[in-house]
Image (tube, grey):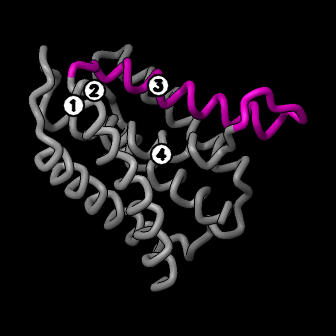
Amino acid sequence: MQNTSKQYDAVIEECRSLFIKKMSDYGSAWRILRLPSLTDQIFIKAQRIRQLQENDVRKVDEGEKSEFIAIINYSIMALIQLEKGVVENPDLSTEDATLLYDKHSKITKDLMLNKNHDYGEAWRDMRVSSLTDLILQKLLRVKQIEDNKGKTLVSEGIDANYQDMINYAVFAMIHLK
């Protein structure tokens, strides 16, 4: 499992690096996005991955990897929005956003390590296409929870679903390397 931790960190570092570069380019404009907007962005990325996996012809020269990175970064943005709330104007410096990014990626990695221990690294035997389908399933769950105004009777909340999407996307990227 030590190898998983190192592989996980390498994927998160790649995603984090892109997040910081985009923060330099755009600032924290994403802070105005409501959760359903972020969920829809993740959904678009997951749908595109599924289409790439199913179609023989690609008309845009981008692969699954960049879409999985986007899923990870948008999911971390959603976790930050859950913590901080939506704002009318961008309000985070690159440094503050990066601290929040690091906080949520660490919490999510800790969850992965605990689940990975209990499941015996079962994800290593899964196909990338199955991980994509699980992300899509989580997205449909999040959409339903959002439609229910965040209320659930017996299910985990939106945050846990975003964390699972991050972890599935990291696993997919590890498989793609």
Q: Earlier in the sequence, mark 4 or mark 2?
A: 2
- Is residue 44 shown above or below 94? above
1 and 2 marks in contact (CB < 8 Å): yes
Mark 3: give few (<14), some (14-19) or many (20+) Cα within 10 Å. some
**Residue at the (15%, 54%) spot, across then down:** 99
Q: From the top left corner, tell me how far across and down residue 143 is, in percent.
A: 44, 22
> At label 1, which amino acid type do we have?
Ser
- Whichever of labels 3 and 1 marks the residue nearer the N terminus, that label is 1
Read off the residue under disc 4: 165
Dot 4 lies on which element? helix
Q: Is residue 163 left or right of residue 83?
A: right
Above or below: residue 26 compared with residue 161: above
Q: Is residue 44 inside the magenta stretch?
A: yes
Q: Which residues are magenta?
A: 32-61
> Element at badge 2?
helix
* Tag of residue 41: 3
* Residue of label 1: 28
